[in-house]
Image (cartoon, rainbow, N blue to C red):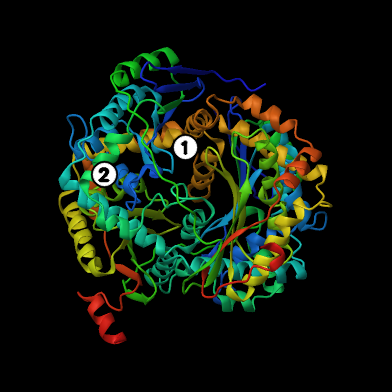
Amino acid sequence: MIDQNIHSHVYDNGLTLLVESMSYVQSAAFTFLVPAGSIYDPPGRCGTATVLSELIVRGAGDRDTKQLSAALDSLGVQRHESPSSAHLGLTGATLSDNLPATLRIYGDIILRPHLPNDQFETARAGVAQSLQALEDEPRQKIFLELRRRCYDAPWGLPTEGTLECLQVMTADEVRGHYEHCFRPDKSILGVAGNVDFDQIKELVGEVFGGWQRLPEPGFEADPRGKQHDHIHHDSAQTHIGIAYEAVPYRHPDYYAAWAAVSVLSGGMSSRLFTEVRERRGLCYAISASLSSLKDEGRVLGYAGTTTERAQETLDVTLHELVRLGEADGDLSNDELERCKARAKSSLIMQQESTISRSSSITRDWYHLGRVTTLEEVRNRVEALTVEAVLSYVREYPARDFTVLTIGPQPLEVASEFS
Amino acid sequence: MNFHNVTLDNGLQIIAELNPQAHSLALGYFVRTGSRDETGEVSGVSHFLEHMAFKGNEHYSADDVNRIFDELGARYNASTSEEVTLFYAAILPEYLPRTFEMLSTLIHPTLRQEDFDMEKNVILEEIGMYEDQPAFTAYEKAMQAHFAGHPLGQSILGTTDSIGGLTSEQMKHYHDRHYLAGNITLAVAGNAKWSNLLQVAEQQCGGWPGGLTERPTEEARPEGAVKIVTKQGSQQQHLMQMAPAPAARNDLRFAAELLTVIVGDDSGSRLYWELVDPGVVEVAELGYNEYDGSGTWLTYLSCDPESTVENIERISDVYEAVNRDGVTADEIAQAQNKVASRIVLRSERPMGRLSSLGGNWVYREEYRSVEDDLRAVRLITRESIRDLLDVYPIGQLTTVAVGPLETLNGNGRADAAKSSG
C-alpha cells in the first residue's frame, strides 16, 4: 500500500488547489498551470505565450525585474516558466519553510505583472535567440517539426514560435494575451512537499481569492503539415521522427497504450533498442513515447543515424512498430512483466521528488478532473494482461505514420507502411 | 543517516550512506579510469569499454543483462568522463542482491568479438550524434586546446579513426590494467542494511584482482589558444572558454562553486543581467569543473554570430570587475540560499546523493553529509572569494568558437562573407 495524503479545493472563482503532503521531505514544489498556452496565440502570432512567459517575470507588484529575481533567489526558489499548447506553466521548488513567501510573490507575478513596454524587445530577442539555437540542434528541432505535422493547428504549432511571427509581434499583443487568458477558472495550482493543506488553502485563498473570472477565449483550428516530409540539414546524422495515433491520457485504454509503448521502448530490453541498436548497431539514440493532449494522443518516435544507414534504420523501426499490432503479433508475458516492474519502481521513486509529484497531481487534474493515487496507478498496471495489450494494439495499430527526416538526404517510406 | 565504509582485502573500497526511511536505493561502481588514462592509439577505449560492459560475461549474454535489469525495474546506466567510469542503478530496496550481482557482472565483461564489432557501430553513431551538437563540439575542442599536451585534453569519445582501428585485444589489455579493485569504489545510498551489503559485496567482489594504477596528476599549465571551427550551416556562434581554477583537492573549490552561481548562473547572475536578460545572447554561463590535480573555469556563450566579439568583451568586463572588486555580501547571501535549496532538493533522492557520495570519495577519500555541504556553503565570505580570486582569477585564456565565423578579429561575419564571395 502506498500511503499518500492528497487534498483538493476549488475556490469560488474557479481556481483549483491540490496539495500532497509529504512529511518525510524538507522541500516543497509547486506547479501552476494557467490556461494561457500557445493554442490561444493570435493567428499569425505564434510564440505569443512564450514571449509572455519571458515578460511576466520582468517586474510584478512593487518589485522591478531585478528585485523580483533577487527576492526569489533569496528564498532559494528553483523556478521555470514553461508554456505548452494548453497552459502557461509556472513551476518552482524550494525548502518548504519558504513556500508561503514564495506563493505570495507568485500572487504578484500572476495578478500584478508589470509587462513593461521597455522590456518587450529584449524578451522577444531572447525567444528569437532560442529559436536560432534550435536550428543547430536537429535532434530537438525534429520534435517541434513533427508535432506540426501530426497534430492540427493550433495544437501542433510550435509553442516556441517562429522567427516570422516574432518579427511582427507587438507588445500590445502580448499584453492582450495576458488580459484575455489569465483567469482563475481552469487554472490549477498543485503543491507537493512538507506542507499543511489547511495552511496552504488559507494562504492561496487570501492571495488569489480576488482574481476575477473571464470568458474562455476562442481559437481556430487549421490543418496540420505534410505527412511525409524532409528538411535539409548538413548534419552528420539523419534525424528521423515518426508519429502515429494513440489514445489520450484520459481514455480507459490509456494503460494498455502505455504498456504497448513500454514494450517498444521502455527499457534496454525493449524491442526498438534490441532490434535497431543492439542487433543491428544502426543507431545510438532510439526511442518512442506517448504524447497526450486532452483529447488526442500520439506515439512520438525518434532515431538518429548516419546517412548511409538511415533508410535501413527507418525500415527496421517501422517494421518493429507495425509487428506488435499485426493480427498474428505476439507479446510474451515476460515482456509485460518487465514493463510492470519498471512502472512499479518508478511509482515508488516518484515519492522522493516533490517536483515530480506536484507536476503529476496537476497533470491528472487537467486531464481527468481528479488525482489518481499511486496505489490506483499500481493497481491499473498490475491488472494489465497480455490479451488487453494485444487487443489495444489491434484496435489502435501503428499505421498511417507521419514521418519527418532532418538531414542531408530524404528517405523513402516503403509503401507497406504508408 | 548512517555512514559506513570498508576496504576489502583486494583494495576495493565500499562506502554507504544508509537511510532506513528512504523509498529506494542507489548503488554505483566508480572506476577511476577515463580518457586521461588512455594512450593516443586507443583513444576512446574507456567509453567504448563502458558500452561493452553491458554485453555480459561467461554467465550472461547481452540480452540477459538488459532483460534482468529491466525485470528488476532498475533505472540503470553508465557514464564515462575524463577520469571516472561510472556504472549505476537505482532500485527498490528488496532487489538489492540480484541488482548487485548484475551490476557486478558489468565490471568484468567477456568482450566477445561479435559484440565488439556490432557495438563499434553504435559508438560511431554516438560520435556522429555529438558532431551535430555544436555546443558539445566546442567543449571537446576547448578541452583539447586548453589542455594541449596534458592528459586531460584527450577526447572521451575518441575519433572515427581511433575507434575504427581499435581491436578487442587492445581493449582487453586496457581493461586488465585499469579495472583493478584498488581503482574501484562502490558507493551506496538509501535504504539498505550494512551487514547485507557487506555480505553480497564480499561474495561478488572479493575475488576481483587487486592493484592500483598510478595516474600522474600534475597541475596543467595551459598556455592558452584560440581555435575557430567554421561551420557555415550553423545559425548561432557557440563559444567555450577555459581558464585555470582550483583542483579537486583544493579547498578553494567551495568558494569557486559559489562564485559561479553569483557570476554565471542561468538566472539572476552577473552574466545573466549583462547578456541574457537584455536578449543579446541565448546563453552566457560560467561553470567550474574540478579534476584530479587541475581545474577549469568554463564559460559558455551561444549568440548571434555578428555580435560574438562584442559579447566576448561584455563577458571580459564582467570578469574584470569581479577579479578586481570581488562580489558583494548581498550577492553571497543570495547565492548561498540558492545553493542550499539545490543541495536539499537533490539529496531527497538516493540517486541524487550517489554522485556526490562517490565523487567525494574517489577524489578526496572523504565523506561529506548534506549538513557538511550546507555548512561549507554558509561559511563562505567576501574574504574567501577574494582569496580564491587572488590565486585563480576568472579568465578566458583558451577560446574555441564553433559556428559561421571564420575569425574573431572584430568583424568575423564580414571576413566570412569576403572569403566565401
At numbered mark 1, what does the secondary structure look like: helix, strand or loop? Answer: helix
Q: Nearer the viewer, mark 1 or mark 2?
A: 2
Co-location on one chain, circles 1 and 2: no
Residue A207 at least partly seen = yes
Q: Secondary structure at mark 2?
A: helix
Q: Position of residue A207 (x, y in %)?
A: 30, 20
Query: Residue at left 53%, top 30%?
Result: A364
Q: Is residue A364 above or below residue B77?
A: above
Work out whether residue A133 or residue A257 is closer to the camera in this orientation and state it: A257
Residue, x 37% and y 33% (percent of image)? Answer: B375
Mark 2 surroundings: few (<14), some (14-19) or many (≥20) residues within 10 A: many
Q: Quadrant of residue B46?
A: bottom right
Identify the disc placed on residue A174: 2
**Residue highlighted by disc 1:** B346
Residue B402 found in image quarter = bottom left
Residue B294: numbered disc:
none
Assign the C terminus of chain B to one quadrant of the image.
Answer: bottom left
- Chain assignment, label 2: A
Say which of A277 and B192 sits in front. A277
**Measured from the top left, where is residue B48 in percent x and y?**
62, 65
Chain label for disc 1: B
